[in-house]
């Protein structure tokens, strides 16, 4: 194999290799000494040291000392995973005056000693291969500086329901300006249609009124009603958002998405007519007004959810139904029967609410998945899963428990903000457990039912969380990003725009130059994923720290076994 | 990088990706999938067994799956033997074909099509028409064939002038297909007739032939 693509020892950079034993974690399962000896024979390597623990105080001092004493220009550490110690070793390089991106990590613990415990020789050979590859890449590493961007100390909150209002108030309380955009004429969202809040035992109207009042009084919050977002440009720290009611666009450092959800309208199901057959939300309205007093009320659960095309459980309908059933028993004294498939009563207070309902005389009938009830001429026919026979229940009011479904505006917003939707059309967070309120795109956060059906308490929790996440950026006023981004060589770019179209983060823009349109990376918005680099037919895009040159050197080294 | 690996001496290339919908970079795995599909087709055109390239999806928590996939691949490639041997391609020819494959895959046409493919399958084209897997397959086949042949001609003309007949023998293709392609290349300004030996025109790269077709 040719040595093409590798720097020669005479002119190449001075590379130091540190082989970590990780106690016995590495040295117990492969021959670390053989590996270290091998490394000393690799091109450009002028210093090799075996450490018991490279990450320990002694190990770090060793690295720092070796850089100074031997004028090392690259440092390769063969140890564990970048997840734990890359920052440690980069910092060690920086301390000794070496650019931290001159550091190359080779993982011989997870990739060798741990997975090849049974075969010492193979583990040793593989460690040699990986170090040879790491050394080859290291020769091509380039120094880089972290990217720092300013953050406009203003937040844009889209959606003025309970989540959006809570998040806005929280951010305002922390001293940040907020622009709150609401599509409707009034703030309040779905909560405006709700009658009663459990477990607070409080009319929802009172709560909404209080919240709207506080938002109105907050001098840092600017409310834009009857307004919609039409265009979003920019990136974390510097979003430029056009809103229908404003002539000039709004600038904001971060965006919180709190657009909520809609209640499914069960057209054509169970004789739905908004009079005698209503949704749970319409029932809330009836309960809030005097007048109605039906003798028999029947509720049907899972109407339009947990079925084909809408597999999910909307989570909050069961509890809403139980809450309303109790209220009906108290207020109207009607007979109430709840037909359910399963009961979703998660949370501490909610389980006890189910007991309250049973005590209040609400009748619960379980119907099987494959035999939904039938409603006709004022009667519901249902097969009880427990009794195994059909029951006929007369009704004066039929209440259908329909799920929350994604808002119709989600798709347009998803495109504008470059944030993904899940399979049903709800917004999808960056990571279900690790980053539940973030989007993969930096500087945009999600809370409330825009993400998934949620109760009031959960909406508030998420709104406070999103506001807290957002304020970490707003507070510092600066955003520091890894410089592992794409770089576009202007002379080679023909401005075709494919990279702009494909970038999942909106991190490339076309700019007008004297030589025509050219693509340019917006460093702070770029995640370094490489989609653009793999797409440019002109080879004009380099992925920094993962350049073709670096990776090719690594691949060639893989097959250069003597 | 796939072709680079084969050129460097790999007998097979395994690409591991996240599961659909779980990509850390939103849709990178779908783009990768499209690219691997067309790469396989170009390899097939180059006479290389496309089984030498395999992509498997798994989550980062599925170490057992990775072990299983890697083991299978190792076994299959070992059975297949060294690159070029079962395919009956000699070393020089292999290099020419891989270079041509690399250029075809890095060229404008394939990069545009694979770039847009995720959009076409997930969201539909400008008219809202979604492409089926079958349609994409046919589209890829066609483009892979055209692009690879073109690149191979350019690669082979680099060394010395060739007649269509010579090219057809080396490329294992019918001369009448190549005649048409040569005419296209001439029109685009990438190839021209160098001399006429007897009644046979000999083709060579024209002035900008080597660099212009990008």
Image (cartoon, coloured by chain):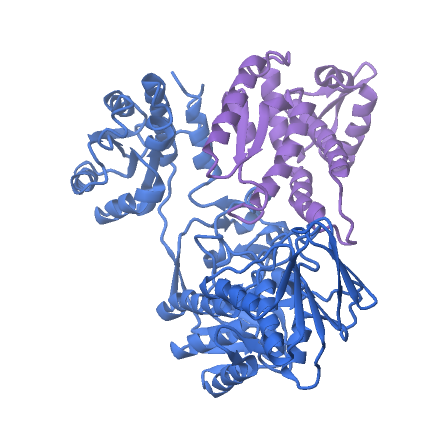
Q: Position of residue A297 (x, y in %)?
A: 70, 71
- Depth check: A281 or A172 in front? A281
The reply, left or right, for residue A203 in relation to residue A131 is: right
The reply, left or right, for residue B105 in relation to residue A110 is: right
- Depth check: A492 or A327 in front? A327
Q: Position of residue A188 (x, y in %)?
A: 58, 78
> How many labels were placed on the picture?
0
The reply, left or right, for residue B37 in relation to residue A433 is: right
Work out whether A33 lies above or below B61.
Answer: above
Please tell me which residue is depicted at 37% across the width and 40% down the height of the picture. A141
Work out whether B208 lies above or below A240.
Answer: above
Whether residue A447 is visible, yes or no, is no
Q: Position of residue A105 (x, y in %)?
A: 34, 37
Whether residue A320 is visible, yes or no, is yes
Q: Which chain is blue?
A: A
Q: Which chain is purple?
A: B
Work out whether A546 lies above or below A180.
Answer: above
Q: Position of residue B81 (x, y in %)?
A: 56, 13
Please tell me which residue is depicted at 54% across the width and 19% down the height of the picture. B11
Q: Quadrant location of residue A208?
A: bottom right
- Depth check: B169 or B101 in front? B101
Q: Quadrant of the C terminus of chain B?
A: top right
Work out whether A439 lies above or below B205.
Answer: below
């Amino acid at each position: 194999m040719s040595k093409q693509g590798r720097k020669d020892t005479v002119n190449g950079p001075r590379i130091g290799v540190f082989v970590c034993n990780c106690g016995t974690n590495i040295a117990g399962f492969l021959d670390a000494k053989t590996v270290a000896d091998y490394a000393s024979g690799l091109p450009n390597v002028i210093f090799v040291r075996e450490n018991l623990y490279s990450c320990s105080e002694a190990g770090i001092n060793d690295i720092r000392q070796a850089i100074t004493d031997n004028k090392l220009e690259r440092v390769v550490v063969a140890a564990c995973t970048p997840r734990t110690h890359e920052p440690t070793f980069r910092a060690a390089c920086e301390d000794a005056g070496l650019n931290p991106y001159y550091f190359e990590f080779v993982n011989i613990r997870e990739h060798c000693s741990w997975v090849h415990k049974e075969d010492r020789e193979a583990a040793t050979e593989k460690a040699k291969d990986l170090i040879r590859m790491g050394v080859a890449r290291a020769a091509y590493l380039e120094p880089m500086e972290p990217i720092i961007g300013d953050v406009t100390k203003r937040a844009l909150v889209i959606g003025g329901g309970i989540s959006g209002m809570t998040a806005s108030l929280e951010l305002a309380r922390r001293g940040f300006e907020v622009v709150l955009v609401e599509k409707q004429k009034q703030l309040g969202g779905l909560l405006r249609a709700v009658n009663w809040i459990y477990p607070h035992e409080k009319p929802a109207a009172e709560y909404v009124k209080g919240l709207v009042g506080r938002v109105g009084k907050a001098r840092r919050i600017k409310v834009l009603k009857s307004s919609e977002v039409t265009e979003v440009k920019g990136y974390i720290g510097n979003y430029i958002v056009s809103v229908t009611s404003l002539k000039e666009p709004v600038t904001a450092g971060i965006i919180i998405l709190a657009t909520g959800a809609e209640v499914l309208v069960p057209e054509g199901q169970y004789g739905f007519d908004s009079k005698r057959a209503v949704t749970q939300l319409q029932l809330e309205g009836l309960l809030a007004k005097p007048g109605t007093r039906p003798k028999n009320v029947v509720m049907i659960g899972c109407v339009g959810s947990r079925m084909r095309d809408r597999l999910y459980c909307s989570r909050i309908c069961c509890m809403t139904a139980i809450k309303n059933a109790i209220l009906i028993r108290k207020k109207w004294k009607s007979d109430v029967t709840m037909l359910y498939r399963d009961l979703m009563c998660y949370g501490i207070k909610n389980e006890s609410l189910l007991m309250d309902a049973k005590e209040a005389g609400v009748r619960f009938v379980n119907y099987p998945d494959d035999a939904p009830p039938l409603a006709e001429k004022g009667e519901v026919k249902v097969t009880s899963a427990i009794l195994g026979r059909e029951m006929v229940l007369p009704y004066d009011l039929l209440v259908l428990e329909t799920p929350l479904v994604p808002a119709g505006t989600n798709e347009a917003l998803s495109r504008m903000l470059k944030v993904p939707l899940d399979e049903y059309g709800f917004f999808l967070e960056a990571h279900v457990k690790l980053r539940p309120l973030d989007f993969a795109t930096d500087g945009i956060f999600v809370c409330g039912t825009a993400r998934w059906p949620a109760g009031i308490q959960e909406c508030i929790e998420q709104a406070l969380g999103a506001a807290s996440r957002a304020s970490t950026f707003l507070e510092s006023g600066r955003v520091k990003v890894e410089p592992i981004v794409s770089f576009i060589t202007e002379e080679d770019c023909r401005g075709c725009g494919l990279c702009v179209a494909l970038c999942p983060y909106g991190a490339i823009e076309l700019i007008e130059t004297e030589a025509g349109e050219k693509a340019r990376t917006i460093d702070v918005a770029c995640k370094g994923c490489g989609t653009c680099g793999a797409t440019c037919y002109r080879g004009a895009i380099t992925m920094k720290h993962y350049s073709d040159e670096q990776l090719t050197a690594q691949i060639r080294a893989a097959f250069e076994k003597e | 990088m796939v072709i680079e690996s084969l050129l460097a001496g790999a007998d097979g290339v395994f690409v591991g990706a996240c599961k659909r919908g779980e990509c850390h970079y939103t849709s990178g795995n779908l783009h990768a999938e499209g690219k691997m599909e067309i790469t396989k087709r170009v390899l097939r055109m180059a006479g290389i067994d496309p089984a030498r390239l395999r992509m498997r999806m798994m989550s980062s928590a599925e170490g057992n799956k990775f072990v299983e996939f890697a083991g299978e691949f190792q076994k299959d490639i070992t059975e297949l033997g060294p690159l070029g041997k079962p395919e009956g391609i000699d070393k020089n020819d292999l290099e020419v074909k891989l270079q041509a494959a690399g250029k075809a895959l890095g060229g404008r046409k394939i990069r545009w099509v694979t770039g847009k493919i995720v959009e076409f399958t997930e969201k539909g084209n400008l008219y809202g028409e979604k492409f089926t897997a079958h349609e994409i397959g046919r589209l890829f086949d066609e483009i892979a064939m055209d692009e690879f042949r073109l690149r191979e001609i350019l690669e082979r003309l680099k060394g010395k002038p060739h007649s269509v007949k010579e090219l057809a023998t080396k490329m294992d293709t019918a001369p009448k297909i190549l005649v048409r392609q040569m005419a296209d290349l001439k029109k685009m300004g990438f190839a021209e007739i160098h001399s006429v030996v007897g009644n046979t025109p000999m083709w060579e790269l024209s002035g900008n032939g080597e660099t212009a077709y990008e």
